[in-house]
Amino acid sequence: MPEFSTSTATALSIAQSLLVAEKDKGPITAALITEKVAIAASVVAPGNEDSVDKAAAVAELIRRFSLWIGQDTALSDTTGHEAWLNAARKKDWRYWPRYRDMLERKMSATAVDAVDKSTDRILGLMEDPGRAGAWDRRGLVVGHVQSGKTANYSGLICKAADSGYKMIIILAGLHNNLRSQTQIRLEEGFLGYETSATGDIVKLIGVGAHGRDFEIKPNCATNRTNTGDFNTKIAKHLAISPEQRPWLFVVKKHKVVLERLLKWIRGHVADATDEHGKRFVSNLPLLLIDDEADHASVDTGEQHIGADGKPDEDHEPKAINSRIRKILNVFAKKAYVGYTATPFANIFIHRQNETPEEGPDLFPQSFIVNLAAPSNYVGPARVFGLQTPEGRSGLPLTRVFQDHASEDGRDGWMPPKHQKDHSPAHMGQDTLPPSLREAVHSFVLACAAREARGQGDEHSSMLVHVTRFTLVQKEVHRQVEDFVQKMKLRITRGIDHEALLDELRALWESDFVPTTDAIASKLTESEEPPSVLPWAEVLAKLPDVLSDIDVRMVNGKAKDALDYAEDGPPLKVIAIGGDKLARGLTLEGLCTSYFVRTTKMYDTLMQMGRWFGYRPGYIDLCRLYTTEELVEWFGHIADASEELREEFDAMAESGATPRDYGLRVQSHPVLLVTSPLKMRTAKNLQLSFSGDLLETVSMHNDGKILDQNLDTANKLIAACGAPGEPNPKRMRGAQEQQWDGFLWNDVPADHIADFFEAFITHPKARKVNSALLRDFVRSMAATGELTSWTVALLGGGSGDKHTFAGGLTIDKMTKRSADKDIADRYAIGRLLSPRDEAIDLDDAAWSAALERTKKMFNPDAGRQKSGVKPSEPDTPNGPSIRFIRGKGSEADGVAPAPQRGLLLLYPLDPQQAGSEALADRKDPVMAFGVSFPSSDSGVKVEYAVDHLLWTQEYGPAD
């Protein structure tokens, strides 16, 4: 959010309140906003209205009032839970109202309402802190990456304190920088005062700054300094009693710290003894919030490796998981709420058995809440686009390079498998590769353009992540600093600066100007289109910007976070970091990122996600420099997240519990894409394809294999006999739909299994593995399901014709363009057009599936390609088609048909692929989509993990 002067901020806040009051009377228009800002300005500065920047206030309010946010969705299990949160309970709240006031000064009323609603929902799913006896609620809140979960849990903490929770423990990250950042945010949002190492109150800030309700000041046992974590010195002097104001603890996920806290609770807070003689806390309700809950709290048995290459005992998840559970187990009344941005978190939870010492595992058995993102959120779906038949179309911000290593990946500036004593050299010289030089230039230009746009009061950052070894980071830091230093000297002193300025100008005109134009058409109403700046304005800002740029190593100290919070000039930082930078630490105003994959795939991807979030007024200046492989992987992760969220919505609609979702997710084929980490330690995966759609989007480009796959398709077509329906037609509502091609019904499972047996899928098509599909069809058929298939051979594209077995001719093969950046295979966007998947449904079943789709419909900006609010669907989505096929709908007279699978065959025209490898091929490249009906049969097939393959792909399991 832009920084405003005090008088403008106050006027903005008043005008927003006036407009909220008008909301029910009619639409909020620009004219109405202008009118209310004028009234507010006359109240704030009577006779001196010009001291209020009215134009900026109007622009900000137009943005805020055009913002939209979808609904959160939730799965819950109310066993043993008593509903308790009602209006009467909220009457005397004091922490939440002052936090709400603070938020309203910074955010739109829509966004604040969304925080209010979702924290009410989460609090209501926790237990009433005043409820007698012992109780235990465990939940998980899934947000989008960098989409404001801290604001959400700060609100939850305020409301929990208002309701009567007395001990609030936040587990914040593995390193001091993240703990310190969380502490600072909670001082602003909950405590209302700045903490210090001496325990004195330094000054009132945030919610306390306006002197509001000072007498309700909460207690805090930790402070914002590097050594401010919970320690024995503090512990000695603390005494906690139930009648006091609530106590806050912000602690690292560190074995020693958690052990210390546990010991202190047992010794100083416990007030009762159980039948085994163990001390426990009977009278103080605990809220434990676990930030980045999928990281180190989950017992994956994974080890963190220190900079010296040795395992870091204190970060061993088993140890951390055990301490967290023990802390929970000491309290009779407790609520555990994990926050995470990755829907895969649940997958990694090993269901440990309950132990007497630790109590149950951290599986969120009580509830899982999926938070919707607001429309100005820029997430993976917008940056990378989701898969469509035309390929992906995201925002044009990614710049791909490969000059960081030699072609064979063995040497060069930063080869993938370098050692901890590697010294980075490009072409044998102690210098940066051209791509990183360009990325630094790009950052300098972004800073200058932000200054020219009047955003000079805000921080700007660049992130360089190319290695996990501290010694190598130091070398990179030296090289980048040296490069920036030389730029500073050349431009500020005017020595040999013409060539450099020409280079910068060329980058500005060839990259920034067209990108700003291209982005303007892809923004939503709540985002202001950026203006294209003339070069002279950018040039004028360069000397000052260069003088301000600071190159730093980010290594986990609290200083990393504190510097952003200090008063003083805004920072312009190039941060060189490794895994310490990885999670959660927000780099304010992140403009430019430069990434090369380090070994831990999953961590790197999630870290890369730090690049998402809110970029008001400068999204067009942001750049992501990375390798083709990472862009492709990130696309996979975006699709996989979307798939799991769809699955979640469908289960929420049918009233499932978190346990049901956990079981579904543990056998979801998405695991083939998302769990390299688990694959290393995993034994074999147990997968079920029920209720799933699989399509081949990565195919071979080797002629022999393509001929075999065509032959396999011809054998299946011959085995099916004469087609039941040439050019099938279906009524869809009031319209008739027609397909070009042939359809067969009641094809036996053996024919389908034989087809999968002989068809060769590409190893990089991670989800579509023909051997697994063969095993699954055979196992299901043995239980009486998937015994009767619908097969369709479809054309209707713009390609050439081809005649298949039995003289069946497809007049126009389908066109699917190859991804030009991927050479080792024929990779396309999506294969199916969504309507094809419903080809086997009659009108009643199609209408029932559409009805279910509408019920599940939940617009979430974090999942939109464009951020534009979608209208209600007019065709059924995949999950509903597969649900109605398998389970039917009694109300609509649709019988369940779990025996019916659907196999769609697509001949792709190689001449239209635009791929050199296929240029001489005339015969089709056969691709298929297979849609499995929903089923409760529980049949799973085993996927044997090839450890050697995974080690080659992801590096050793450290």
Image (spheres, grey):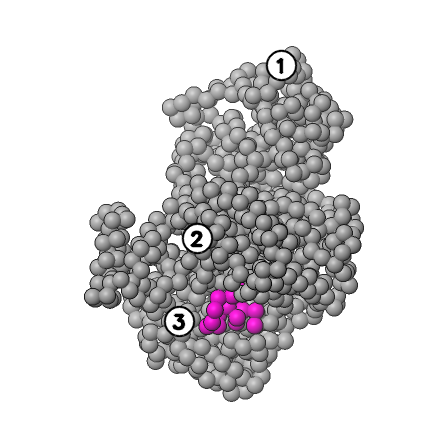
Horizontally, is 312 left or right of 246 in the view? right
Nearest to N terminus: mark 2 or mark 3: 3
For label 2, the residue is: 617
The residue range painted magenta reads 559-577
- Check if residue 569 falls in the magenta segment: yes
For the N terminus, the quadrant is bottom left
For label 3, the residue is: 206
Disc 1 crowd, CA 10 A, few/some/many (<14, 14-19, 20+): some
Q: Nearer the observer, disc 2 or disc 3?
A: 2
Label 2 to label 1, Cα distance in Å?
Answer: 57 Å
Nearest to N terminus: mark 3 or mark 1: 3
Disc 1 secondary structure class: loop
Q: Position of residue 808 (x, y in %)?
A: 62, 14
Q: Position of residue 347 (x, y in %)?
A: 60, 53
Q: Position of residue 402 (x, y in %)?
A: 69, 46
Q: Nearer the observer, disc 2 or disc 1?
A: 2
Is 19 placed above or below 512 here?
Answer: below
Q: Quadrant of residue 956?
A: bottom right
Residue type indicated by callout 2: Gly
Label 3 to label 1, Cα distance in Å?
Answer: 73 Å
Disc number at residue 808? 1
